[in-house]
Amino acid sequence: MSDQTPGAPAPLSAIGRHKALERLWGTPPGWGALSAVNHSTVGLRFIITSFVFFLIGGVLAMLIRAQLAGPETDFLDAAAYAQVFTMHGTVMMFLFAIPAIEGLALYMLPKLLGARDLAFPRLSAFGYWCYLFGGSILILAMLGGVAPDSGWFMYTPLSSKPYSPGINSDVWLIGVTFVEVSAVCAAVEFMTTVLKIRTGGMALHRMPIMVWYLWVTAAMMLFGFPPLILGSVLLELERAFDWPFFDPTRGGSPLLWQHLFWLFGHPEVYIIFLPGAGIISTILPVFTGQKLVGHAWIIVALIALGFISFGIWAHHMFATGIPHLSLAFFSAASTLVVIPTAVQIFAWLATLLSGRPRITLSMLYFYGFLSTFVIGGLTGVMVAVVPFDWQAHDTHFIVAHLHYVLMGGFVFPVLAGIYYWLPHFTGRKHLEGLGRTAFALIMIGFNAAFLPMHLTGLWGMPRRVFTYGGEMGWDLLNLISSVAGFILAIGFALVVVDVVQVARFGRRSRRNPWGASTLEWGMPTPPPAYNMGSQPHVTSRDPLEDDPGLPAALARGEGYLGQPRNGWRETLSVHMLSGEPDQVVLLPGPTLMPLWTALATGLFFVSFLFKLYPLSAIAFVLIVICGWRWMWASGLQEDAAPVDIGRGQTAPLHAMTADPPTLWGMVFTLMANGVFFGALVFGYLFLWVVAPNWPPPALLAREPVTPLLVLAGLGLGLTAVWRATTANGLGRLADSRTWLLVSAAAGAVIAGGALAVPLFTAPAPNSHAYAAAVTFISGYLAFHGLIAAILSAYAWARSRHGWISPQRAVEFSALRLWWLYLGATGLISLALLHGPAWMS
Amino acid sequence: MTPHFRPFGDLLALVGAFLLWSLAFVLLYGAHGVACARGWASPDEPWPLRVILVGLWLAMTALSIAYAWWSWRRRSDDGAERFLRLTTVAIAVVGAASTAWLGLPLLLLRVCA
């Protein structure tokens, strides 16, 4: 398969290659495990941690069902019940579902793509620590009796200071935001990885279907999470400093919170569903022996679903008094979203009907998924219709609907995936007996628990009420739900026992026990840290079907990058469309930097939680120092020639190319940032148009100094960074550094000009939502000016060390992107800040 | 052979139809919300606002159809490029249909009730 390049070192044996690659890619033992950045290790940590949280969420569900088993039960009082149901929703949505997806993608994406790791391994590790620390804040608060208690969607004014005076809501806002940092990191990582870090020959149309699902999911995370992060920051600012974004008596609006929350919250449902559907689309062809029917149409449906799911956020707000016609737009979109979902369901049914299904445990969960999810989907269509929604709103009908969707659309496919990939994770085979018993208990328990809730809901039983009177007639159905809930819990406990005993005592499984055709099965199981001895060249979506001898050939080093060298962690990067190799990415090895950065981030959040603001400022400086050191360790310190990649080909190292993954990381980071800013603009305009008590009693002072300072900084900075880039390209490095210093100074001028607004010309931010908004926008602008200054100084320092050359100039590309973003958002910010004052 | 491909342009083109759909959604919802909140349309005399909104909707639908036609004309016969272009066409057609569906309530409901 491969040609050995003349002059290359003698090829290693398969065992020798294994040992050499394992040394390079492995995680150090003992305390060194804290420095792990390998995607398999970090992915498994995510998965295991998410399932620990799932079990905690399950225990909370048992408490809920124990309380509701009969009328007027005093097992939990109202306050404790509020904490329990809030934490149940929060844990399941933020600490289980999304991180489980992240873990699955972290672990599986490189394997599906034939790569050795993800684009940014340190970012994966950082994301894990953020997730662990953020989740721990929530759980520790619960153990301390101060868990959030305003519902998992934290509606204001219930979650506002006057009605939630304790620390409970702050715990939610800070803990969940900390976890969301992890989700945004993962989204950036996955977007870049799918586009660039694939094996040779893997053109877009040859990517496994699961990769398409994960890619669309990552894009949705990138666009879905920033509005909630913004909402959480604004609400925390209101609670901490009395900035009245959501207080209608001072120009705020509780509806703004609902918009920001559901801008995230509805896409979240599909963010959770799509990976589950991806698992189904992956396993169904394997167990039916039939290619996935409608492959291309599924991709079209996925992309349609990704967009339409953002157009239905307000269907959670049908009861808020929005004009009927506006509701009808959301209702139209809500009915529209059924079609791409149905396309997938019909494609699965067609695959099933045209194949010869093997009834494995995974397939049982597929059937469970299909029946459950279709029921949840149909009740979803019912609540998408406004008049029906008004009847069912905030009743147990909705509880039933959402559990049918989420258990059906996510948990069952994940269980199917667990049993499908268990031999991959563990290298061991499972016996189906215990698993089938667990499946039966889960299906019976689930349906008996949640089917009756449709009725109790339609009979008027509201959500989130800790007890009910015996005269309501809801007691029998609730008792059935509670008993069944415990049967469901026993089923899940059996799954845990089954998985643990397989991992511990299961018989060794042969490689690729299901006869699958995708690349993750082309490696030893459990997989080594480097995945494959060499990276394959693929010519279709089914490489293992095309060449059953491929795994052995890869182990012999007959693919790409089969010859370890220089202590490098190498993986291929490809042309986005054709999949032709275009660079070799050198990835970082184990490092504690992600942990230190996450600890600094944690210190920032925790000090904010306890109102130790000077400590927050110190933590911010620590984060900047960590970020600087993180970047400093990246890239090449001198120019390098293209290297041999095997198969008679050469490719440049990533730092020597115009579009290394780093650049795409910056592009996607700025996209997420842009969504955050867009949500901020929306919020400001929303308050201006809809909220009561506008126009505000006082506007910014009309003065030219601060806007001119910012304008001058923007013009100077953009000019300087372009001149610096040109000078570097021409090899005039001293000139380039001078311009970089000018660029840094310009960033500082912008920060100063923006900060002067709240300091000198704006009304006090607690006086009105307008004043709070302009203070926040000024802070946003100042922050970005400061980052521009730091990035410019960083590029200057690297250039001074001789680590930037005309050929190695990714720092300039990234810096130009940042400045372009700053230019665009700076001009919009100036218009928002000063426009009303100058027009009044 | 490396196909003709511009990362930003072609990936944006892939989802262009739904970017138009999103724009149509924001314009219709935003214009309607602002007009009703500001009292620019009385519930009793909704026709001028309805005419504006229907005009917006039809314009966006026409633009989406034009985009689908443009996508169709850009299709290619080369492997990976063919896949990308045909997928773009399919998404464009679905996107145009979605935009058309989105505005139908304009013909049925009172504007600011």
Image: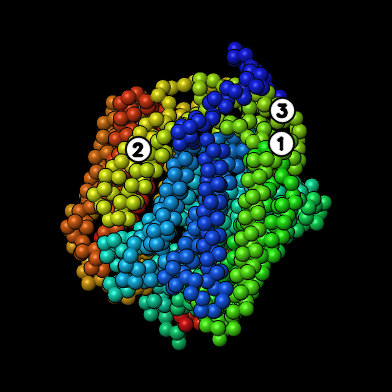
Q: Percent position (x, y) of residue A702?
A: 19, 62
Is residue A715 visible in this depiction of the protein?
A: no
Using the image, tell me which numbered label, if any, was put on residue A552: 3
Marks 3 and 1, how far apart in space? 19 Å
Q: Percent position (x, y) of residue B74?
A: 62, 48
- Identity of the amino acid at label 3? Ala
- Which residue position is annotated with label 1? A508
Mark 3, other Cα within 10 Å: few <14 / some 14–19 / many ≥20: some
- Asked if residue A403 lies left or right of residue A811, the reply is right
Q: Which quarter of the rendered picture does the N terminus of chain B lie within? A: top right
Helix, strand or loop status at disc 1: strand
> Vertically, is A367 above or below A654?
below
Mark 1, other Cα within 10 Å: few <14 / some 14–19 / many ≥20: some
> Vertically, is A342 above or below A331?
above
Residues at marks 1 and 2, common chain?
A: yes
Mark 2, other Cα within 10 Å: few <14 / some 14–19 / many ≥20: many
